[in-house]
Amino acid sequence: MSSSSPAFEPPDAIFHLDSALLLERYARGERDFRNLHLIGANLAGQDLAGINLRQANLQDSDFSGAVLVGANFREARLNRANFQGANLTLANLIGADLSDANLSQANLSEAGMRAVSLVRAHLGQAMLRETNLNEASLDHALLPQAQLTDANLSRAKMLAVVMPGANLDRANLTSALLNGADMAETSLVGAWLSGASLVGANLQDCNLSRAQMMATNLVNINLSRANLRGTNLSWSSLRGANLQGAVLYRTKLSWSNLSGANLTNAVMLNARLSYTNLSHTDIQGTVLPDGFTLEQPRTGE
């Protein structure tokens, strides 16, 4: 006599629910909704702390104002999702696709976001303190006034990212790609940028004091009026850089290439220039390491 095995759903099977049924099952204590297919879900303002939505397809869904503390969105598809004002503290977003998503004013503190895609995402005023964004993709993302203190952005790809007024104090940007980034008026005090590439980036009026920027590619960068007090820029390329009015007090520039750079009216007191390439560098009005200033020539002379 043969007996049939009881039907069961394999743990990796895709399944469908509507928003109402998901909330009903969550209220009954269920937390595991991995592989859920629920495009365009309306979960705004809901408390879904600890929910497991690993590898779920939640494109175009609305999580605005939701409580998602410790939620698992690992490898989930969240393209164009709305997380505005949501609480994602300690959430797992490793490998998730958040391209074109709205995360403005969201709290992502201490979240795991390694290798996440945030291409063209909106993160204005988002909280990302101590967040792990190692190897994340943030090309063309918008992060004005975002808080990224102590965040890990090592090897992140951030081409043409827009983040004026953001706070990246003590952030790890080692070997990050920031070519063409707009980072005007950002704070990078004590940040790590060694091996990073910022070709053509705008860091006007930035505070980079005590930052570690050894062997960085800063060709054609705009660092006008930037604070580079005590910054380590040894072995870096600053060819064609705009350092007009920058503060370079005690800045380490040994073995760096500043050929063709604009240093007019910069302050370089006690800067270290051992083996520095200063060919074709404009130093009119610059306070040199020994305190000497090359005055601007008078009209008619």
Image: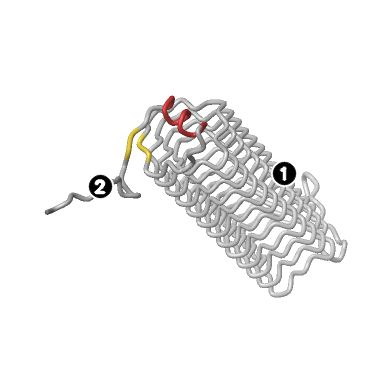
**What residue is at 56 percent from the left and 46 percent from the top?**
91
Q: In this view, does 65 lie to the left or right of 77?
A: right
Residue sitting nearer the eye, 253 or 123: 123
Earlier residue among tags 2 and 1: 2
Q: Which amino acid does label 1 sit on?
A: Asp
**What residue is at 43 percent from the left and 25 percent from the top?**
20
Residue sitting nearer the eye, 16 or 93: 16
Report the coloring of the rendering. secondary structure
Task: Provide the secondary structure element on which disc 2 rests.
Answer: loop
Q: Residues within 10 Å of mark 2 (few under 14, many from 20)?
A: few
Residue 37 spot, x, y in % from top left: 35, 36
Residue 176 spot, x, y in % from top left: 55, 57
Confirm or deny contact between disc 2 and disc 1 (CB under 8 A).
Answer: no
Residue sitting nearer the eye, 74 or 230: 74
**What residue is at 41 percent from the left and 35 percent from the top?**
58
The residue beneath circle 1 is: 205
The residue beneath circle 2 is: 6
For the N terminus, the quadrant is bottom left
Residue 28 spot, x, y in % from top left: 50, 33
Picture quadrant of residue 202: top right
Residue 272 vertical position relative to residue 266 in the rendered view, above or below: below
Picture quadrant of residue 97: top left
| C-alpha distance separating marks 2 and 1 | 67 Å
Residue 7 vertical position relative to residue 25 in the rendered view, above or below: below
Task: Provide the secondary structure element on which disc 1 rests.
Answer: loop
Q: Is residue 259 left or right of residue 113?
A: right
Q: How crowded is mark 1: few (under 14 residues within 10 Å), some or many (20 or more)?
A: many
Q: Which amino acid does label 2 sit on?
A: Pro
Residue sitting nearer the eye, 170 or 49: 49
Q: In this view, does 192 lie to the left or right of 114?
A: right
Q: Residue 244 carries which label?
A: none
